[in-house]
Image (spheres, rainbow, N blue to C red):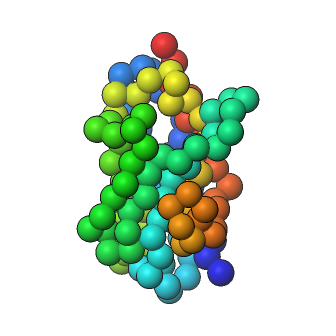
Amino acid sequence: QVQLVESGGGLVQAGGSLRLSCAASGRIFGSYAMGWFRQPPGKEREFVGRISWSGTTTTYADSVKGRFTISRDNAKNTVYLQMSSLKPEDTAVYFCTAGGTTYSPTFWGQGTQVTVSS
């Protein structure tokens, strides 16, 4: 079992930056691919990005490519989502995920709210 706790959400102006963190429990953190999803208000959850267990491979949704960066520190059992050039349409609850497949992860965090004002 893996428990995930996100932090770092908040209110930011358009064009600004924000970094989300996800702290994971369990000694096997380093064996899981980790990812981020988001759910905009009134919409379905959508894939944001994913990082391999080694951190060498990342995949991003087209909507965030070039603006968002995922990284991980296996020594700290933590994965990060660095968000830059934020847009109002990035407003959503952001979820950290672990394991499973790219679009069907096994474990989910509780989510953290990100609001981008115009």
Q: Quadrant of the N terminus?
A: bottom right
Left-right relation of 23 to 85: right
Q: Residue at x 56, y 76 (%)?
A: 25
Left-right relation of 83 to 5: left
Q: Is residue 91 above or below residue 103?
A: above
Q: Residue at x 55, y 35 (%)?
A: 114
Q: Residue furthest right?
A: 42
Q: Residue at x 59, y 65 (%)?
A: 105
Q: Where in the figure is residue 53, as x and y percent of width and height?
A: 39, 74
Q: Where in the figure is residue 112, as x and y percent of width and height?
A: 61, 45
Q: Where in the figure is residue 24, as x and y percent of width and height?
A: 53, 70
Q: Where in the figure is residue 94, as x and y percent of width and height?
A: 57, 45
Left-right relation of 109 to 20: right
Left-right relation of 23 to 58: right
Q: Is residue 7 visible?
A: no
Q: Is residue 116 above or below residue 83?
A: above
Residue 13 lies in what quarter of the image? top left
Q: Residue at x 44, y 81 (%)?
A: 31
- Taking depth in this image into account, of 35 and 101 the one nearest to the observer is 101
Q: Is residue 61 visible?
A: yes
